[in-house]
Image (cartoon, coloured by chain):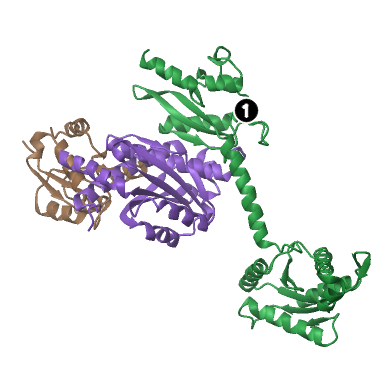
Chain colours: A green, B purple, C brown
Amino acid sequence: MSVDNFCETISDQINTGILVVSLDFTIVKWNRFLQVHANVTPEKVLGKCIFDVFPELPKKWFERKLSSVIQLGTQSFCSWEQRHHLFELPHTRPITTDSHFMAQNCTFLPITSDNVITHICILIEDATDVCHYQTMLNKTLESLAMANRIDGLTQIFNRKHWEECLAKEFSRARRYNHGLALIMFDLDHFKLLNDTYGHLGGDKVLVETSKTIQSLLRLCDQFGRYGGEEFAIVLPETDLVGAADVAERIRAAIEGTDINFQDQIIRTSVSVGVSIINSQDKRYEDLIQNADNALYKAKSSGRNRVCLSTELP
Amino acid sequence: MSALNLNEDQQDCLQELINVAMGQASDQLARYLDTFVHLKVPSIEQVDAKSLSNSLNDEQMAVAVVSQGFFGYEGIRGEALLIYQPRDSDRLADLLGYEPEELSVEEQIIDLSSILTTTFLNVFAGQIDNQMSYSAPRLLSSTKSLVSEHLHQLSFNWDLALKIKITYQVTDYSFNCDMILLIPESAIINIKTVLNRILDEF
Amino acid sequence: MGSSVLVCDDSNLARKQLLRSLPEQLSTKTQIATNGEEALEILRSQNIDILFLDLTMPVLDGVGVLQAIKDENINIAVFVISADIQPEMQSKVLALGAKEFLRKPVKTEVLNEHLTKHGFL
C-alpha cells in the first residue's frame, strides 16, 4: 500500500469533515465523514457548486471568507462560538442537545500548487459536545452568579449585591449630577410576630412583604433585604417628593395587605425612612445613615409612618 | 543578563526582520482591506510572567482581546494577543468587506484578528525560511478581569517571555489595535538559534 | 570606473544584507552611516555617487535626508530601500528626488537591474 493510499484511508476514517473546493466553488473532495453525516455520496456532490449542495450557506459571507484565504494566502477559521454551524449537518447527539444541527469549528486552508493557490480545503470538526458542555457551564455560571446576588428567602437582592448597586448608582448620580433617593423600612413589632406565629409565620410575612413591594417599584429601582426584617430600595433619578410618594404607597400597601398563614390572617405595618442624595454626601454610606436616622424617627414617633431625612420643599 | 536576553546583534536582526514583515504585511492588508494599514515601529522587550498582566492592563482599557496560538518549525511558537479599544469596533464589518448583518461584532473582531496575526506571521516566517500553523482564534473576553485571568493562566507555563508589540492603525476608519506576540522562554532559545544562523550568513 | 557608495541604515543586518547584494565593482568603495545625520555629514564632506537610504531611522529619518539633499543641492543618486512600502511613501520620496524605491530585503538581481538602468553598471 502506498503512502497516498494511507492518506486516502486516513481521510476516510478521520472524524473530521474534509471538503475541498476549487476557486469557482466546485466541490472536488468529499470524505466519508461528510458522506455519512450529510448522507450524500461523493458521486452526487463532486463537480457540483458548494452553494447548490449547501443552499443554507451565507453566500456573500462565504465568498468573502474564501477571498481572504486566497488573497492573503493564509488559513482562516470559523468557530461554533460565533457561528453555531455553517453546514446543516445532523449531529450524533440528537437527544441531549437542543440544536438541530452539528455545532462546528471550521478551518479554511489554502492549497497551493507551484506557489499558486488552486483550491481551498475546508475542515469541519464536530463541536457539538463542546458546545453542549459549554452551554451547560454557562447556564450554571449564570445561576451561580444569580445565587450570589439573591436572598434565598425573599428572592430579592441580598445585602451585598444591593450595596454594590447603591455604590454604582451613587457614583453615577455624583458624576452626572442626577437625583438619587433611598428608602429603608422595617417591619413593625417583627419579634412579636415571630413569637405569635412562629418563625415560619415570620418568614411568610417577609416573603409576602417583598412581593407586595416589588409590584410597586419601577424596573430601575433596586430592592434588597438589608438585614433580618429591614429592607432598602435604591431609587435612581428620583427627588424627595417622588421618594416620599413611593414610601407612603409602600406603607399603605403593607398596612392594607392581609397575609394568610395556616388559616390565620396576619396584618403588619412598616416604618419607613427616606433620604436623598445631597451635596454633603461623600460616600453612599452617608445616604444610608440619613435614611436610617429617618427610619429611627419613624419608629420612635409611633411606627407605621414615613419620615424624611430633610423637610419637603 | 540572563541567557535568554537577546544580544545587540540578535535584537537588531529581529527588529529588522519584523520591520520587513510589517512592511509586507501592511501592503497585503492594504490590498485586501482596500485601505491603508499603518504598522507602528515595534517594541521588543523581555517580560516576566508576573508583570505582564499589569503592563498590559495599565496601558489601556481593552474591550476585547483575541488570542491565537502560532507554531512553526524549529520550535518557534508563541501566542498572539490582539487588543482592541472601546471605540474601535464600530465599523469593522465595513472594513472587512462584510455587510454588518452578516456577522456579529464578536465574529468581526475575531476575523480581523486572525487576518492581522496570520498575515504578519506568515511574512515573518517566510523570512526565516519557516512556515506557521495557527490555532483557531479565541475571543478571551470583553471584560478586563477575564483578560488578566487568561494571562494569569498563561503564565503558569513560563516565567519569562519575549514580548513584541506592534500597533496597527487604519486611518480611514480611525481604528487602532495592538498586536502583542508573546514568545515563551523555551521558544526564545529557538529564536536565538535562528537569529544566529541569519547573522552568520552575513 | 567604480562609483563611491554610501549605505545608510540603522540596522546592522540591513547594511550587511545590502553590502552583500552589491555588485563587485561597487562593493569596494563603500562607507556606512547608521542614521540620517551621519549620512549628511559624509555627503557634505566627500564626493559620493550613490546613496542607499533606509527610511525609518533614529536621529534623522530618510525623508529628512532627502529633504536636506534637495535643500543643499547635493548631487547624488539616492536609492531608497525600505520595509515601509506604502504607495504614499513611495510617491513622497520619489517627489523628493529619489531615483528608485526598492523593497527590503533587496535582491541582487533587482539591485543590478536598477543600477544598470541608471548607468552605474
Regarding mark 1 in the picture, which secondary structure is present there? loop
Quadrant into which the C terminus of chain A falls:
bottom right
Report crowding for label 1: few under 14, some 14 to 19, many 20 or more residues within 10 A (C-alpha): some
Percent of width and height locating residue C109: 20, 30
Residue B100 seen: no
Quadrant for residue A62, please give it: top right
Q: Position of residue B143 (x, y in %)?
A: 54, 56
Of the pair B155 and B170, the residue shown nearer to us: B155
Image quadrant assignment for residue A116: top left
As displayed, is residue A259 above or below residue A129?
A: below
**In the displayed structure, does residue A289 sit left or right of residue A16?**
right
Query: Which residue lies at the image location 34% right of the left edge and 25% below the top edge?
Result: A115
Q: Is residue A86 above or below residue A165?
A: above
**Is residue A98 visible in the rendered structure shown here?**
yes
Residue A122 point in image, percent of width and height:
49, 27
In this view, the residue in front, C95 or A29, is: A29
Q: Is residue A89 left or right of residue B191?
A: right
Q: Residue furthest bottom?
A: A301
Instruction: Report the chain holding disc 1.
Output: A
Report the front residue among A290 and C44. Answer: A290
Question: On the image, numbered disc 1 is attached to which residue?
Answer: A88
Residue A236: image quadrant is bottom right
| Residue visible at 56% across and 19% down in the picture | A35
Q: Horizontal and vertical percent for residue C41?
A: 14, 56
**Kind of residue at badge 1:** Glu
